[in-house]
Image: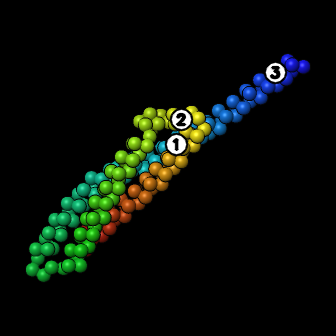
Amino acid sequence: MKFILKSILVGMVFISFSCQQKEESTEAKAFDAQMKQTIQIHDDVMPQVSKINSLITELESEKEELESAEEVNTQLVGKHAAAIVDLQNAHDLMMSWMKNFSSSFSRTEINTGLQAKDKDSIKAKVELLEMQYNSAEEMKAAINSSIENAQKVLAE
């Protein structure tokens, strides 16, 4: 009788461990997929930083020309100034996001996946990554809209 109870107990322990590993594996796979999506946003937006810098330079140059004209079009000068600030804010948002992201996750977690082992650590990392993903989406939208707006101002 004791042998049967011990066998059942050992079996239950093995089952509980295997279920826990599957759950963590599912969490780890979700983390890895979310990490890839987040990094992809960064990789898509990063080349636009040089575009932002060139647009700022171009807008500043045009703004100076507009300000030195005999008849200053204050509305157009204002649009240039606002577009410059918008681009600078988008650039700062990108730099801030990268700093926050790199301080939130180790290089190993970024490159090879989730390193946490216990359930609470995994849950915390998954939630943190979700916040970083949402922040990356906002950063991408800010960069794209600031570039689009700057190009419209330059076309006027």
Q: Which residue is mark 3?
A: 6
The residues bearing labels 2 and 1 have C-alpha atoms spaced at a distance of 8 Å
> Is residue 138 something that shows in the picture?
yes
Whether tag 2 and tag 1 are in contact, CB under 8 A, the answer is: yes
Residue, disc 1: 125
Kind of residue at disc 1: Lys
Residue 79: image x %, image y %? 26, 73
Residue nearer the viewer, 11 or 121? 121
Q: Tell me, what colour scheme is on the image?
A: rainbow
Q: Quadrant of residue 10?
A: top right
| 3 or 1: tag closer to the N-terminus | 3
Tell me the residue at 15%/73% (across/down).
Answer: 66
Please, what secondary structure does the residue beneath circle 2 have? loop
The answer for how far apart the CA atoms under marks 3 and 1 are is 37 Å
x and y percent of residue 3 in the render? 85, 18
Residue 59 place in picture, x, y as percent: 21, 65
The amino acid sitting under disc 3 is: Lys
Q: How dense is the environment of label 1, judged by Cα within 10 Å: few (below 14), some, or many (20 and up)? A: many
* Residue at figure coordinates x 46%, y 48% from the top left: 38
Instruction: Give amino acid for label 2.
Output: Ala
Residue 144 falls in which quadrant of the image?
bottom left
Q: Is residue 143 above or below residue 27?
A: below
Residue 89 occupies quadrant: bottom left
- In space, the residues marked 2 and 3 are separated at their CA atoms by 32 Å
Give the mark count. Answer: 3
Helix, strand, or loop for circle 3? helix
Q: Is residue 150 left or right of residue 61?
A: right
